[in-house]
Image (cartoon, rainbow, N blue to C red):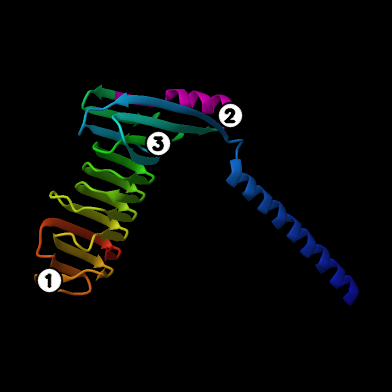
Amino acid sequence: MKTSSVARLLGQTVCSVLAIIALAGCDVMVGMGGFGGRELAKDQWTKTYKLAQGGQLEIVNTSGSIRTEATDGDVIDIVADRTARATTPEAAKELLQKLEMREQVAPDRVSIEVRLPVRGNVEVQFVVKVPRSAALRLSNTNGKIVVAGAQGAVRAEVTNGSVNGRGLMGAVDASTTNGSVTLDVDTVAKDGIKVGTTNGGIHLTLPTSAQAEIRASCVNGGVSASNLTLESQGNQSGRRIDARLNGGGARIDLDTTNGGIKITGK
């Protein structure tokens, strides 16, 4: 075979291979965007409740997110965007209809629990306006929790996802398994702050004038404090802080296994 023929044959082969690769790439993109004819069904679930001063709101979600914003007044406004995915529009709609929003309502307590179908791909995105004085008890399995402006106690638990809080004034108990916790508090309440993660970092920002007993430790990572005047209360290391802030006061406990801890004064 002549050299030119060999070159021509190789060129044809390469072009054929590239064409196959290009087709494969298109198939992958289609798969990411809806492989197998995957379809969506969406709706919006809205509710309004009155809550007594200092009452509690509880939300238990499985997949999606929970965002709360503190407002004046005594009304809870909940908007939940719900999405189901299935192979056909009909199946997606049927799946969405099987999603349960279980309510327990009393003057001083409102509880919403998402119950998903046994099988199916469904998520719920909560956006909630809640009275400032309300205590919050929020739980999510896959997705984030965001809390803004709460003056009551906050308890937030996530399995896979992050917890983010800002402008908080009450006691805080936040934990994640796979995810980070970022808190910016305006006041360290008398019942203190407790944060724990397994795989994720912790960042706490608090007033420089706060009075607290701080204990922070990690297994794999570092612990640091900045813009705060701390009085050491024991052995310190790059992985542990045990100190008083402004003479001591409420307890702050921060623990993580894999991740760093940062404590910052503002």
Give the distance between the C-alpha atoms of the residues marked 1 and 3, in whole angstroms.
42 Å
- In this rendering, the label closer to the viewer, 1 or 3: 1
Q: Name the residue under label 2.
A: 88
Disc 3 crowd rating (10 Å Cα; few below 14, some 14-19, many 20+) is many
Q: What residue type is labelled 1?
A: Glu
Q: Which amino acid does label 2 sit on?
A: Thr
Give the distance between the C-alpha atoms of the residues marked 1 and 2, in whole angstroms.
63 Å
Q: What residue sits 33% from the left and 53% below the top?
A: 178
Residue 98 magenta: yes
Q: Name the residue under label 3.
A: 126
* Closer to the camera in the image, 76 or 198: 76
Give the distance between the C-alpha atoms of the residues marked 3 and 2, in whole angstroms.
25 Å
Q: Identify the residue at the far bottom of this view.
A: 3
Q: Does 201 sit above or below residue 166?
A: below
Q: Where is residue 75 in the image (x, y as percent from the top left)?
A: 32, 28
Q: Mark 1 points at which residue?
A: 231
Q: What residue sits 25% from the left and 49% below the top?
A: 174
Q: Give the range drawn in magenta.
A: 87-103
Q: Is residue 266 left or right of residue 43?
A: left
Location of the N terminus (image quadrant)? bottom right
* CB contact under 8 Å: marks 1 and 3: no
Disc 2 crowd rating (10 Å Cα; few below 14, some 14-19, many 20+) is some
Circle nearer the N terminus (1, 2): 2
Location of the C terminus (image quadrant)? bottom left
Image quarter of residue 50: top left
Q: Where is residue 181 in the image (x, y as percent from the top left)?
A: 31, 54
Q: What residue type is labelled 3?
A: Phe
Q: Where is residue 182 in the image (x, y as percent from the top left)?
A: 32, 56
Circle nearer the N terminus (1, 3): 3
Circle nearer the N terminus (3, 2): 2
Q: What residue sits 36% from the left and 25% below the top?
A: 48
